[in-house]
Amino acid sequence: MKQHSTPIIIKDNQVQSFEKVALNSSLYDENWIQNLCFKNSALLPIDEIEPTFGGMIPICRELSTESGYIDLIYLNESGFITIGECKLWRNPEARRKVVGQVLDYAKDLSKWDFTKFETECIKSRKGNKTSLFKILLEFYPEIDEATFIDNVQNNLKKGRFLLVIIGDGIRENMEELATYIHRNGNLNFTLSLIEIPIYKNPNGDEIIVTPRILAKTKEIERIIYRISENEMENGLTDTLKPTEGKSISEKVFYERLEATIGKEKTNQLQEFINKLSAELNIITKLGRGKRLSLNLKSPNDTYNFASIQENGEVWFYGIVYKTNEIGEKQIGIDYLKNLATTIKATFDDNYSEWGWCVKRHGKYVNIAEYMNFKEEWIKIISGTLERINKIEENQ
């Protein structure tokens, strides 16, 4: 069972504890949670769940579908749709029904095309905007309308949604209900459970909202059914088991990367990452700025050995800065210099220390070129980790 402590305020060396607010009153009810999340979309830690869905803009509340009304609909500049469902966990029945409910909503939307989705969203929004593009344009003035529409249409067709269930006190058994989605393999969604406990200052009017992610599923790959004429006659089907799923953000990252560097080099990168993981316990983390990026990080998530952008450029964030924190700045410098020598590029320290990197003729080198030196790169990372570990063991 998860245990969470109560927030406190320290002022003039005096400690004041906040009080937990019960979300079952006429003031703090499901509608209050829904309104809070709609007006403050940044409250939800979406970048930690699926970076691809980050930067989302609230579109409408109470979107009408065949299965009922969706509490919240969000959309971002890349056309990714987030479905939010707000529930209070007052009884076991409500907890059991909510997962099935939000999955039904996702299935309904996957049957819609862009025109249907836009029409229903604008109707539910009840504002003065006449298109989804105009809504997003206020926040992202550089987006292209045709590309945006195509992206929304594609995500609807593929069922690529982020499903977020938001509650006041999700219990452990509620998290276990997430396994229910394994029976719904016809959509490419991610499901996340977010708890938003509310605390109030007993000596004032302030409240604190402390959202936390309780559970997150991997994307469920589409299940493909192959039925031959003979199997159909005998009532038999061969179900292809889905491969180990990537998150939607991972899948989108590799799709975009492949469009730039090709399938062969993209496959090489994935094999390289698998080897790094197996041999050195290197972990990968997706990030989102102006574009998706894949970060290769040390086992303790402290040292970033590369940040691969979706266009193939390889950036570097903080390796020198972080090794300087343990008193050995030269370890980070040597890592970048050795890598630069290997790929016949140069060590670039023209900007802030955090951004020291490897470039060639002032430009970042593409990951496709790094893949010609996979073994050498692994040795450089391995040697760097050994030096870091020795320093940390002696501290």
Image (tube, rainbow, N blue to C red):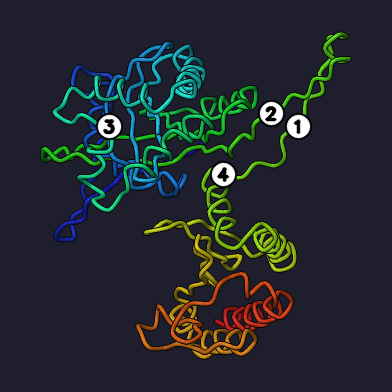
**Residue found at x 42% / y 58%:** 291
**Residue found at x 24% / y 41%:** 208
Q: Which mark is residue 59?
A: 3
Query: Is the Cβ of the residue at disc 2 closer than 8 Å to that at disc 1?
Result: yes
Pointer 1 local density, CA inside 10 Å: few below 14, some 14–19, many at least 20: few
Q: Earlier in the sequence, mark 4 or mark 3?
A: 3
Q: Which mark is residue 29?
A: none
Gap in angstroms between the C-alphas marked 1 and 4: 17 Å
Q: Quadrant of residue 395?
A: bottom right
Q: Classify 379 as above or below 258.
A: below
- In the structure shown, which secondary structural element does the residue marked by tag 2 occupy? loop
Q: Amino acid at mark 4?
A: Ser
- The percent position of residue 169, horizontal first and vertical second, equals 39, 29
* Residue at the spot of label 1: 241
Q: Earlier in the sequence, mark 2 or mark 1?
A: 2
* Residue at the spot of label 2: 223
Q: Amino acid at mark 3?
A: Ile
Q: Classify 88 as above or below 290.
A: above
- In the structure shown, which secondary structural element does the residue marked by tag 3 occupy? strand
- In the structure shown, which secondary structural element does the residue marked by tag 4 occupy? loop
**Residue found at x 53% / y 48%:** 252
**Residue found at x 34% / y 15%:** 64
Gap in angstroms between the C-alphas marked 2 and 1: 7 Å
